[in-house]
Amino acid sequence: MSFSVSRGGTWWSAADAGGVSLPSIDPELPDILVGALARLAVPAGTVADGALAVPDAPGGTMTNGLLAAHEAAPADGGEPLDGTGPVAAGYFGFESDAPAVFEVASSLSRGPVPRPNPQHVTAVTAVPAREDYERAVADVLGDLTGPGPLAKIVLGRWADVEADRKIDTVSLAAALALGNPEATVMRLAASTPDGPQTLVTATPELLIARRGRRVTSRPLAGSAVRHPDPVRDARQAEALLADAKNLREHRFVVEAIADTLLPLCIDLRVPGTPGLVSTPAMWHLATEITGTLRDDVNVAALAQLLHPTPAVAGTPTDLARDLIARLETRPRGPLTGAAGWMTATGDGEFHVVIRAALVAGNRARLFAGAGIVAGSVPRDEALETAAKMRTVLTALGLSQSIE
Ligand SMILES: C=C(O[C@@H]1C=C(C(=O)O)C=C[C@H]1O)C(=O)O
């Protein structure tokens, strides 16, 4: 197995990775990863066996010792990976019973983004079609405006892609990296009910980064489609920043993340109003939340605590998740899960798996969702999901999105 991570024109990859696969999101997962990394971190024979024992909980003596050296580094400075030590990379899925898959490598090689080969797509099908998705959104608006507790739900749809030969996942990830230099592009081994697949994402959304005790989260929610005309594009961005519905949609996510991080932090900075981030396809409201951890909680454990945020599920989370399982055509599995990496110190980054595809042989499945709140317009939400699909479809060589 192998994985790759790319950002800002650099490409890290692991050729010698070993796998850790669990049938579902598991509270033990961060400890299992810490154990696997600790075994790789220390050259055999240099430390007595006893000292190598994996601590029972994250934050045991070994990770604490290694952490001290990293304490001074800011969470948002420097490169995302140095590649010189062991790294675990993988994902856990959207549903709590979806498999979690990680690979552990003793080191990464680093180089430029490879040149992508062209792909050979022959068909793209929206599942469900636009009218059916709009009907589902219209139906759920009844729940959002009624007396019940549901305040936000993220409803998505799929694009099923077929090619006349094998889809080359390294080329797909490379094309995504070249077309979206700000995104974090990951190519990871995935497990689905249909068998092993490859997960490829060019995500703009940081769930959590940890460097020493410093943590950063940059949730996105509230979106507008980019316009080819620069004047109208700037107007769309300004309108988004001032739009009450989108600001409310965004606030649910910021509050959920702040509520989770607050008890874990000795300080937490949560800006009161969002800023903007853009991808070639979309504008998004974004808030950068930063804090300092009280205890040594590793980044995989933090990601499990935060996932899924209302950016991909809704508010309240459990109700939204149950409704999504009933209303969406298929389980999401890795899509809208959390993917990232962790080093032996417990540092690393996890990102929300959006602008993503699951690839198997000649086929790929893309997913895109949109946050629905009272006041949402079904047609606009359908257009938003189609615009979000454009990121991966462009990297597959297509100039058009789904309807
Ligand atoms: C769910 C997706 O995107 C999420 C939903 C957003 C929204 O509703 O505005 C914006 C960014 C993401 O947090 C997706 O891209 O599939």
Image: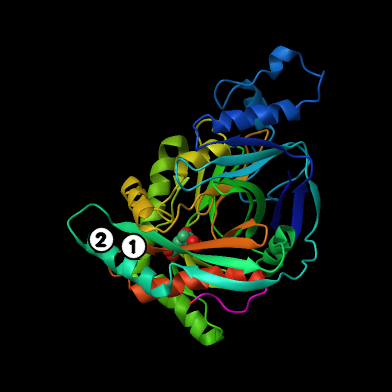
Residue 399 colored in magenta in the image? yes
Q: Residue 83 placed where, x, y %?
A: 76, 44
Q: Residue at x 33, y 66 (%)?
A: 136
Name the foreground residue: 173 vs 374: 173
The image quadrant that residue 400 belongs to is: bottom right
Cα separation between marks 1 and 2: 13 Å
- Amino acid at the residue labelled 1: Arg
Magenta residues: mostly which secondary structure?
loop
Above-or-below relation of 210 to 233: above
Q: Residue 345 placed where, x, y %?
A: 66, 33
Q: Residue at x 64, y 26 (%)?
A: 35
Q: Which residue is mark 2?
A: 144
Q: Which residue is mark 1?
A: 248
Magenta segment boundaries in residue numbering: 397-402
Above-or-below relation of 281 to 176: below
Asked if residue 346 lies left or right of residue 245, the reply is right
Secondary structure, mark 2, is helix
Q: Residue 103 placed where, x, y %?
A: 68, 39
Residue 221 visible here: no
Q: Residue at x 67, y 62 (%)?
A: 362
Q: Residue 156 placed where, x, y %?
A: 43, 62
- Amino acid at the residue labelled 2: Leu
Q: Residue furthest left?
A: 147
Q: Nearer the viewer, mark 1 or mark 2?
A: 2
